Amino acid sequence: MNMILQQTLCYLASGNNKYGNLGIDKSQMSQFKFKDINYDFEHIYLGNKHAIGIWKNGTMYTWGDNTYYQLGFMEYVSKPSEVKFFTYSGIKIVQADGGDKHTIALDSNGNVWTWGSNSNGQLGRTDVPIGQFTYNPAQLPSYMFGGEKVMFVAAQDLITLVRTASGKVYIFGLCTKFLCDVTSNKAITTPTLLNVSVNASRLFVGSQNIFVEDSQGFVYVRGKNDYGQLCFAPEESDTNDQSGYYQKQFKVIQKGGFEKIALGLAHSVMMSNNVAYGCGALFNAPFEQVRDAGKILDIAVSAHGFLVLEKKQVYVKGTDTSGELGLGGQNVVSDGSILKLKNYKKIISRNDFSFIYKHSGLSAGAITAIVIGSVVGVVVIVAAVVFGIYVYKKKGSNYKQIGEKEEKEMMNKPDEW
């Protein structure tokens, strides 16, 4: 008897569920504490009001708000549902992201796909008029990105960004003066090169700021900086007008070495060598050290808070508006709280809802069942062997093949418990 024990990947969800974006029925408007949702996703990505799950085999699922067909189909669903376009086409998705009304996906061949609302050109497509929307994913031609393979895609609000193999960054959608070289909001309907003087090895995107890391590990930043969220003092920004402080030209802040950077509305969080650092509204100084309590696995930021995933717990700080920090919502403010959780992998948050990837451990009942089943299986095997020997000795060699056949059938019979 062969017995395989497999850990499945499920997730914990908490926060605003107005559109079913937690993967549970939207009749439950909010989930104020992290709740176990049993779906097996390798990666999860979040839009403003919808979510995207990708299996290890490249199958994509979506759930949440579908007002603009950003889920990749026309139906309204109350749980994660497969985007069958990619499955039927044999296309494997490796990475994705969501904006306020649209979705972008990257396939295993480096091709970019978009769908949902094209209100401001954020789809980069000519077949969907500005202001219209579509549930049909379509591939953007590679010439839009200089014929290069795309390595990473990102979406925020009404904007989309793409990073190519050579490190070029393209941007399209509703450009603000915080993100693009414009003096006022402007819709850019085709992918346009971002004015950054270095080739990007990694790209981190917030709704009002962009961090680019080059191949040497130096981090360049631009965007809103009223609270020092760019990790330098607001008055050191190159622009200050009626919109406040912001950085128009990319500015290097330091050599990073960061494993991850997460960007919120007015704060940023980084992780490096099992230490978490923060800049902006929730912190007293640039690169303030906020956690070094052992093994740090991941970080995430919500609109007004952040989460640090550690080996046996989650550290959260900020304002828990809708339960996204798992503290009960109702605008609870925390100067630092610990949530005791086990067997998790990654964490992600967008605005007012969050997910924690969780390896589901086996319950005591399940372990007991496995032990009992194993014992029963061994007893069956031993009994079969003894029976075969007995038949052989009793009836002679004419029954040898029958005894072996019965034994093999019993050994291959699946366990049931």
Image (cartoon, helix red, strand yellow):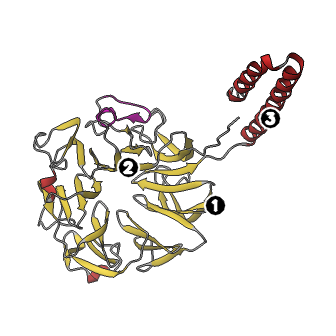
In this orientation, does residue 329 appear?
A: no
Q: Is residue 181 left or right of residue 16?
A: left
Q: Which of the two discs, 2 and 3, sits closer to the camera?
A: 3
Inspect the magenta stretch and tell me whether residue 80 lies in it. yes
Q: Which residues are magenta?
A: 75-89
Look at the numbered disc 2 and give the secondary structure of its residue.
strand
Q: Determine the residue positioned at 71% across, 27% down.
A: 408
Would you name the residue on which mark 2 appears?
46
Q: Determine the residue positioned at 16% across, 52% down.
A: 142
The image quadrant of residue 227 is bottom left
Would you name the residue on which mark 3 appears?
378
Amino acid at dot 1 = Lys
Q: Horizontal and vertical percent for residue 370?
A: 74, 38
Would you name the residue on which mark 1 appears?
312
Q: Which of the two discs, 1 and 3, sits closer to the camera?
A: 3
Q: Is residue 43 left or right of residue 116?
A: right
The image quadrant of residue 59 is top left
Which of the image's four quarters has the N terminus?
top right
Amino acid at dot 2 = Leu
Q: Is residue 385 left or right of residue 5?
A: right
